[in-house]
Amino acid sequence: MMKAPPEQLILNVDDTDAARYAKTRVLQYAGFRVIEAASGSEALEKAAQERPDLVLLDTKLPDINGFDVCRKLKEDPHTAMVLVLQTSASYIGKPDKIRALDTGADNYLFEPIEPEELVANVRALLRLGRVERELREMDRRKDEFLAILAHELRNPLGPIRNAVELLRQLDPSPSELQENARQMILRQTDHMVRLVDDLLDVSRISQGKITLKRGPVELCALVRAAIETSQPNIRKRQHALDVHLPEHELWIDGDEVRLSQVISNLLNNAAKFTPPGGQITLSASFADGQAVVRVQDDGIGISPADMANIFDLFSQAGHSPDRVQDGLGIGLSLVRTLVQLHGGTVSAESEGPGKGSTFEVRLPAQEADAPACASAGAASAPDAKQYRILVVDDSVDAAEIVGALLEHAGHQVKLAHDGAGAIAAALAMQPDVVFLDIGLPDMSGVAVAAAMRREPSLQRTALVALTGYGQDKDREEARAAGFNHHLTKPVSLDVLDATVRRFAVQI
């Protein structure tokens, strides 16, 4: 009989001494290390302490039956991945096997069990467990790789985009050829940023890691934000956008950023798959306790064969003949995921190729008496105050171009390129705002922020993370370290200046 690897540990649980002894000897002879338990509570305790590779679990125990022991093992995060091979001489019907599998058992055997059958089942489960662990490790490494890739791609995109912004500020009246070249750089840079974000969303979707930050969201404001995001794509394709909004406010309990992403994804999809000069209609209404958002276009349409998988990940049913098929094909899949997380539904309709498409989103909502698009009042005069700003980035190019943009906006700027230099510069300068990169050579930006927050003289300084790391966990870590805000590279001059004027006066 082939011996098992010496590191594999089996927990043998049976209240009958003779049966437990026999199974232990069989497993030891096959080369496994074996520990024993004679009750359910003892099994749970030893599983938590010893972390066995597999638990050989009898169903009939004196204190807790084996079904409940299995369920408890699988519910505990520390033992959830431990394999469970359940055995029974008492519960030998098909419903018993189904019950065991439903409570989390990885297999179920009726006793008496031949020694060869027992060893073969244990080995088969351990092989599956090893493969599952390898897949989890590969998945973890993939997420780590994507996060690093996103950071490394965003770092050079920031200076490129900001350099174009600075050129525009320095020369507001360029020739048509120069302006076209600048617009091309900005468009392609923004496209690269969208592809990076799509890569990260693929990972979040596949693992169910998208989390919502819920709160009251007004639909009209949501539509405005989505149109603002999608307008460059619509304008570039020379489409006409017709917008119809409800007469009264509609309030949704949801994540404002993610819901805006839903609508902008639908608008971008309509712009992408409609030939230049097309018509896009965005409408919102209230029906049966739901907010109904419809995006209609007169583009390439959807064939009946493609309609069935239009919301699947990486699905791209076709493309407008005047352009290449860009993007990763996750926009509609992300729309469906986000809408379902909000308790809503999304559907698509088309009469066929060349006859346009209509996408409809329905979300639980409440109608209010206030007008939906009431005027916000006269805009206040812009804040022209000069602020002291420290820009910290180990990339000299990135720091210098952000500093140049902020100086052009009228602020006093100093630069630092490592954590120790940043802390020293902040203590000397007493800045109103610090734009702080997370990936620094000597210490992390999170550690720098925590150190600054311990300094009494910097308590009123606003700390803004300006980084290529843009995942949810990165934002949470930034908040926990004392950052007031988190920006993901690349960032435009308008956003930089608005951030300064927003947070410098709040601290």
Image (cartoon, rainbow, N blue to C red):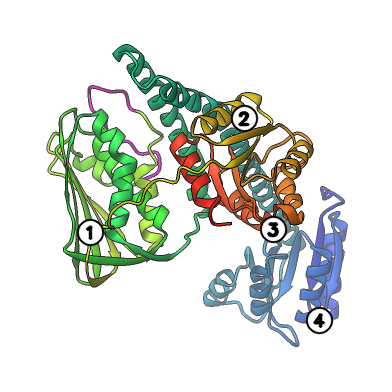
Q: Quadrant of residue 26?
A: bottom right
| Front residue (pair 31, 115) | 31
Residue 425: x and y in percent read 74, 38
Q: Residue drawn at (63%, 64%), measured in percent from left and top?
A: 107
Judging by the rendered image, the residue that carries numbered circle 1 is 373
Q: Is residue 481 above or below residue 402?
A: below
User: Which numbered disc flags the more N-terminal residue, 2 or 1?
Assistant: 1
| Front residue (pair 363, 90) | 363
SS of the residue under disc 4: loop
Report crowding for label 3: few under 14, some 14 to 19, many 20 or more residues within 10 A (C-alpha): some
CA separation in Å, label 4 and label 3: 21 Å
Q: Residue drawn at (68%, 82%), measured in percent from left and top?
A: 65
Q: Is residue 257 left or right of residue 247?
A: right
Q: In which quarter of the image is residue 167?
A: top left
Res 492 seen here: no
Residue 121, numbered label: 3
SS of the residue under disc 2: helix
Residue 399, numbered label: 2
Disc number lying in front (3 or 1): 1
User: Which numbered disc flags the more N-terminal residue, 3 or 2?
Assistant: 3
Residue stretch rendered in magenta on the structure: 312-325
CA separation in Å, label 3 and label 2: 60 Å
| Front residue (pair 33, 456) | 456
Judging by the rendered image, the residue that carries numbered circle 4 is 16
Asked if disc 3 and disc 1 are in contact, CB closer than 8 Å, the reply is no
Q: Which amino acid does label 1 sit on?
A: Cys
Q: What residue type is labelled 2?
A: Ala
User: Which numbered disc flags the more N-terminal residue, 3 or 1?
Assistant: 3
